[in-house]
Image (tube, coloured by chain):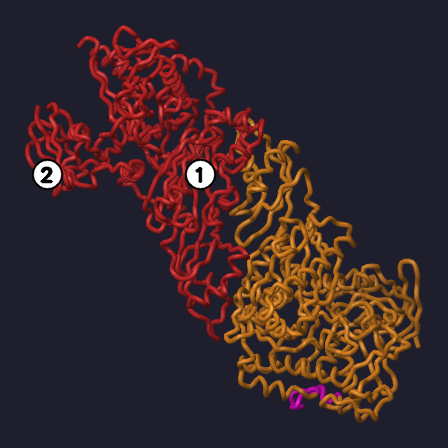
Chain colours: A red, B orange
Amino acid sequence: MPKVKFCLDEESKEIEVKTGVTLLEAAAKAEIRLNSICGGDGICAGCKVKVTKGEVKAEPTILLSREEVKGGYVLACQTKVVEQLEVEVPPESRAEEGQILIDEDAQRFKALTAGEQSYKHEPLVKKRFFQLPSPNLQDNLADHQRLYREIRRKEEVPTMQMGLKVLSNIQNLLRNNNWGVTVTLGRRGGTTEVIQLEDGNRTTQNYGVAIDIGTTTVVAHLVDLSNGNTLGAEARYNSQIEHGEEVTRRIIYSDQTGIEKLQEVIIEDINKLISTLVSQNQLELEHLTTVICSGNTTMLHFLLGLDPTHIRKDPYVPLSTNPPPIRAAEVGIRINPRGLLYSMPSIGGWVGGDITAGVLASGIHRRDDLTMLIDIGTNGEILVGNKEWMLSASASAGPAFEGTGARSGMRASKGAIERVEITDDDLRYSVIGGGKPKGICGSGLIDLVAELFKVGFINRTGKLDTERSTRVQETGVGAQFVVVTADESRTGEDIVITQPDIENLIRAKAAIYAGAHILMQRLNLDFDKLDHLLIAGGFGAYIDRESARILGLIPDIPLSKVQFIGNTSIIGTKMALLSHQALKEANEISQSVTYYDLINYPNYFDEFTRAKFLPHTDLDKFPTVTSEIHNRKHQ
Amino acid sequence: MPKVKFCLDEESKEIEVKTGVTLLEAAAKAEIRLNSICGGDGICAGCKVKVTKGEVKAEPTILLSREEVKGGYVLACQTKVVEQLEVEVPPESRAEEGQILIDEDAQRFKALTAGEQSYKHEPLVKKRFFQLPSPNLQDNLADHQRLYREIRRKEEVPTMQMGLKVLSNIQNLLRNNNWGVTVTLGRRGGTTEVIQLEDGNRTTQNYGVAIDIGTTTVVAHLVDLSNGNTLGAEARYNSQIEHGEEVTRRIIYSDQTGIEKLQEVIIEDINKLISTLVSQNQLELEHLTTVICSGNTTMLHFLLGLDPTHIRKDPYVPLSTNPPPIRAAEVGIRINPRGLLYSMPSIGGWVGGDITAGVLASGIHRRDDLTMLIDIGTNGEILVGNKEWMLSASASAGPAFEGTGARSGMRASKGAIERVEITDDDLRYSVIGGGKPKGICGSGLIDLVAELFKVGFINRTGKLDTERSTRVQETGVGAQFVVVTADESRTGEDIVITQPDIENLIRAKAAIYAGAHILMQRLNLDFDKLDHLLIAGGFGAYIDRESARILGLIPDIPLSKVQFIGNTSIIGTKMALLSHQALKEANEISQSVTYYDLINYPNYFDEFTRAKFLPHTDLDKFPTVTSEIHNRKHQ
C-alpha cells in the first residue's frame, strides 16, 4: 500500500492507504480534516492541496487556475492515490474544529452562487457616517431636514421615518460632534427608519444575527454587517421540545395553555445563543442592530406570539406568512433596544420561511432548469420548480433525521458520528471534530441504515437480522445494532441503533419520498426529468448521496444530479440579513410558490405505505440500487 | 327713511334705514346676523337674500345664477336700499351664534377655493370597511396577507405597515365577525400604517381635530373625517403665556428651565379643547384618530418637546421644520391611544406651519398672479409670491393685535367689540354674538385706532388729544379713551384703550409694514405690483381693510385688491387633515418658500422707525389715506 505524507504548517503525518482512495479519504484517515462542503463532489474547492512528490490520478476541474495546476495543486476529493506521495496542506484548506458550522456554510454559499449574480451588500439595518455641512445664514435648514438632505444625497431612501426619541437627540449630537453623525438605517418594508443616531463614525459597530428556528435545533450565526463576514455560529436544541417534539403537538399545547410559554422558551433560547456569540466575540449587545429569523411557519408564529391554531385546522390558514419587522425588544430579544427583528416570509402554513430561504440560497427561482429541493428537518419540505413556477409540499418526517428521535441520536455537533461504513467484518466511522464519539447525527444515521441494508444486516422492511453479526444484539425491548462499544465511546455507553430507531427512519424517509413522488405526479413528470436534486438540512458535514438513495429517501436518479447543500435556511436568511434586495426577492418567492397540501391528497397514505420499504416496494423505481444490492450479494 | 322688513323662518323684523345703506347693514341693525366672511366684499356669497317686494340697487355679481337673479336673490352686502322692501332671509345665510368660528372658516374656505380644483377627500387617517372572502383550500392565504390583498384591491397603498399588537388581534376578529373588518389606515409619510382593526363597519366613527397653536390663542376644530364636516370649534388662550408673551421669551424660559413645562402646558390646553369638543358632540375619545397641529415653528417644537434654542441664535436653525407623525399618546394627547399626531410643516425658524397652512388655504402657490399674505398674530409673517417662487419673512409684532396686549383687549370671542365707528359726537360698535361687550378684539382695536386718527383724537404719533373729546381722559398713568362706559359693559368696568395700548399697536403695525416693505424692496417691486393682498389672522369676523390702510398696517393700494381671509392657519390645517394630498402639497410649499431673515437686514430698524407714524413718516407712500384725512378735516 502506498504511503502518503501530509505536510502541515508545523507537523507532518504519514499514513498507508489503498491504491485508488482519494486524497480526501487519505487525509481523513490521517485525522486531517479538510474542507469538503460539497461532500466530495469537486465543486466547492475547499479541499485544495499541493502534491509535491509523486504522481496522482486527478479528475479535471475548472476550480483551479492554470498556475495552480502547474504548481501541483489538486482537489483532494477528485484525486486518487496511485503511488507514494508527499502532499502539502495549505492552512485555508483545513477545517478548524470550532469553525465547522461557519466555514461550511460560508463555502457552501460560495459554491452555490458561483457564477451567479450575487446580491448587493446592503444590510437590512446599516450604519452610515455623514459629515453634514454646518449651517449658516445662507443655509439654515433645520437639523432634521439637514440630516435627511445629506442621507438622500448619499443613499437611495424613497421614504424615511424617524421616531420622536431619536429626533429629539439630534440637536446636541450634531453640535457636539462637529456635524458628523453615524445614522443607523433600518428597512421596514418600503420605508427606511432612522433607528438611532450616534456620535462620530461608528459604522463598523454594526452586527446582526441570522437564526434558523428549527423544530428541533436552533442555529444562530453572528455576522459583521459592515463587511458581511460571519464571526461565529452556535446551535442548541429548541427548548420547546419538552412541550412536544412535533409541530402539531406544540400547536395543540399552545391552544390549550396559551402561546406565551412557547414564545418565552424560544426567545430564551435565542437570547442564550446571542449571548454566547456576543461574549465569544467580545462585542457589546448594543452594537447588535438586527436579528432575522427563519423557520417553519409555526415556529415563526411562536417567535412573535402569534396564534398558530388555524395552521392545523382545515383550510390551514396561518395568521401571517409575512409578519412585519418589529423592534426585537418587543418580544424580549436582547440586542440594541431599538434594533429590529425580521422574519423570513413563509410560503404557507406548512412550508415556512426556511424553505423560502432555501430557494433564495439555492437560486431555484432564477434557474431555467428543473430543480427539486428537499429540506430534511423535523418536517420534510419538498419544493420543485424553476424560474417560471414552483410547487411545494410538506411531509411530516418527525425528528428522526435530526438525531433526537434515536436512542443514540444527537445533533450534528462535536462528537457526533457523521459517516459510517460497514463491511461484513468491519465498521468505520468518522466523528465531527475528531476524538471519541458521543452519538450519531442525521447523516450518520442515514449512512448506518444504508450500510446495514447493503451488507444485509437488515432486510427490506428494516428488520435486524440477529444471525448476521455479533454487533446485532437482542435486548429485552428488541434488537439493536452496536455501532461503538462503551469502551470506545466518550459517554462510556454503547452507541447503538435500535429496531424502533430504524423503523422511525424508514417511516420518515417514506413520508418524504411519498411527498416528492406526489408532487411529480401532479406535474405529470418522472423523477428523471429533474435536472437537479438538492438536499438541504443541518446534518453535519454532508449527507452521503448514495446512502440516501439506497434508503429510498431520494429517488433513483444519477448521483451527479444530486447535491447536498447543507442548512440553506440559515444561508438564505443570512443573505437576506446582508441584502434587502435578497429579502425583497424572498418576499416574491414566498408569494409565487404554490403550496400543495398533501394531507388532503387521497393517494398520500398509499404512497407513504409503498415507500416504507428499502428502498421501496416497487423495486423498478430503484433499478440502480437494486442492481447494486444484487451485485453485492453475489460478490 | 324707507322701511325694510326681513322675513325669517318663524318671525319677521322691520326696521327703518337711511337710503343707500346696504341690506347687510340693515340686517345688522335689525340684529340679524348674516354670513359675511369676505367682510362685505361680495365674494363669499354668504349673505344671499331674496327681495320679495320693492326695488333695490344691486351691484352685478357672478356668484348668483341667472335663475337666482330672476328669482330676486341678491347679495346683501352688494345691495343698497332705495325704497321700502320686503326681504326673505334663507336659513343658510344666517350666522348662528355658537357657529361663528366654524361657519366663517367653512365659508371663507369655500370662497377661497371657488373655481379652483379642491383636494380629494382622503383624510390622513381613514377608516375603511372590508368584507374579506372567507378562506378555503383553494385560497388559504394567511389572515394578514388576506387583509392586505383586500386593502390593496380597494385602496392605493404602495407600502403598508402594521404593528405586532394590531396583527395579533386579526385572527379572532375576522372569524368572529364573518370576515368583515373596519381598518383604520394612517398616513406616515410615504407609508400607510394599519393603526387598528375593529369589528364590523365602523367607518363613520372617525373624527379628527385640527389645531392652530397660536402664541396667544389656541383654536381647535373638530371634524367628522368620514364626510369632512366641521362639528365644532373651540378656542382658548395659550397657557404658556405666563412663561412669556412672546416667542423669544418662551425660548429663553425653556432654555433655562427645560422644555417639559411648556410642553406640558400646551398639551393640557389641547386636551381641554378636545375634551370640550368631544363632550359637546357626545363623542367617545377612542373615535378620535387624528390630531393635526399648526403654529409657528417654536410652538410646534414645544408641542413635541423638541428644543427650540437655536431658533433664536444665529444662524437660526430649528431642530425640525417637518417632524414626523407620531402617536398622539406619546406626547400625552388624549385621543385613541393609537391615534396619530401630525404637524404642519414649517418654512423656517420664524415662518411656521401656520404660514404653510395659509399658503395652502389661499392657493398662492398655484396662482400666476402676485399675491402677498400677511398673517397677523403675535408674530406678523409676510409672504409674497406666486406659483413660481415665494419669499417670506417674520416681523415681531407682539400680541397687540390679538387683544391680550391691550388693557381691555380680548380674544375674538363672544362679547368682544369687533367693529368701531367714531364720529365727533358718537361712537358705534358691534359685539361678537351681540349683547353687552366685555372687551375689544384685534379687529376692534384696528378700527378704533384708525377711527381715533380719522376724527383727530390722536395725532400721527398716536398721542391722544385730551382736548377733543370727553371720552379722552387723563389718569394717573397716562391718557386713555373710553370706548364703553362701565354701565354699558358686561364686566361693569370701562372698556378703554390706553395711550400705551395705542403705542403698542403702532409699533406692531410698523414692524409688519416694515417687513412687507423690505420684502418688496428685495424683489425690486413696488406695492402696486401686487395683484392681491391677503390679510389673515384670528381677529373675529373680519378686519376692516380701510382701517388697516389708515393705520398703515397695509400699504396704500386699492382696497379691491385687499381681502381679509381669517384664520387661514386652521383652514389650511383642516385641509391637510382631510386630504393627504393637501399635506403633501404643504410639504412642497414648506420646502419651496425662501425664508428671508429681517433681523439681519441692515435697513430693517430704519424702516421700522419710519413706519411708526400714522399712516407712515413718508406720506407720499399713503396718498389715498392722506387725501382722505385731509378731506375729512376740511369737511
> Three-letter amino acid code at disc 1?
Ile
Say what secondary structure mark 1 lies in.
Answer: helix
Task: Please tell me whether residue B280 is drawn above or below residue B470 in the rendered image.
Answer: above
In the image, residue B617 lies in the stretch drawn in magenta: yes
Report the side of B562 relative to A241 (left or right). right
Residue indicated by mark 1 = A270
Which residue is drawn at the image coordinates 7% and 28% (left, top)? A83
Residue A141 picture location, percent across and down: 49, 68
Which residue is drawn at the image coordinates 23% and 10% (left, top)? A630
Q: Name the image quarter holding residue A425.
A: top left
| Label 1 neighbour load within 10 Å: few <14, some 14-19, many 20+ | many
Residue B55 picture location, percent across and down: 87, 70
Which residue is drawn at the image coordinates 11% and 28% (left, top)? A81
Residue lying farthest to the top in this orientation: A467
- Give the mark nearest the N terminus, 2 or 1: 2
In the image, residue B356 lies in the stretch drawn in magenta: no
Q: Which mark is residue A490?
A: none
Task: Please tell me whether residue B232 is drawn above or below residue A402 in the rendered image.
Answer: below
- Locate the C terminus of chain B by quadrant: bottom right
Alpha carbon separation for disc pair 2 and 1: 46 Å
Q: What's the magenta region?
A: B614-628
Say what secondary structure mark 2 lies in.
Answer: loop
Q: Dots 2 and 1: beta carbons under 8 Å?
A: no
Chain that bears disc 1 = A
Say if labels 2 and 1 share a chain: yes
Q: Name the image quarter holding residue B515.
A: bottom right
Report the side of B57 relative to B294 (left or right). right
Report the side of B64 relative to B531 (left or right). right
Query: Of circles 2 and 1, which is in front?
Result: 1
Residue A322 picture location, percent across and down: 49, 38
